[in-house]
Amino acid sequence: MNGLTFSLDMPGLYALPDDDIAAVLTYVRRNWDHGASAVEPRTITKLRATTRPIPWTERELLKIK
């Protein structure tokens, strides 16, 4: 951005409630797939139980290369 460098962490989705994430995903689905069903907050709740609850660190991500 105009030559500026930022050194900030991107907040993880864990910071948002399930209702908000479901609403955003529903918006995206309906705009790209006109008529897709809504994403239910309970679906997000189930998915959260199967994913990493904390953000990846820069060191961890660099090891993936």
Image (tube, rainbow, N blue to C red):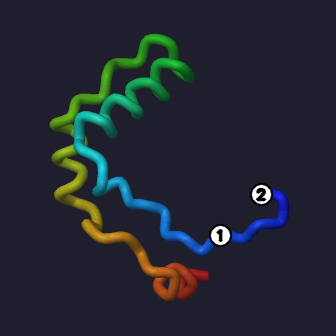
- Placement of 57 over or under 12, stated as above or below: below
Amino acid on which disc 1 is placed:
Phe
Crowding around mark 2 (Cα neighbors within 10 Å: few <14, some 14 to 19, many 20+) is: few
Name which quarter of the figure residue 4 lies in: bottom right
Asked whether, in this view, residue 26 is left or right of residue 62, the answer is left
- Placement of 9 over or under 38, stated as above or below: below
Q: Give SS at disc 1.
A: loop
Q: Which residue is mark 1?
A: 6
Image coords of residue 44 (percent x, y): 24, 43
User: What residue appears at the point 30 percent right and 29 percent down from the top-left corner?
Assistant: 39
Q: Which residue is mark 2?
A: 1
- Placement of 25 over or under 11, stated as above or below: above
Amino acid on which disc 2 is placed:
Met
Crowding around mark 1 (Cα neighbors within 10 Å: few <14, some 14 to 19, many 20+) is: few
Name which quarter of the figure residue 25 lies in: top left
Asked whether, in this view, residue 42 is left or right of residue 32, the answer is left
Image coords of residue 60 (percent x, y): 47, 84
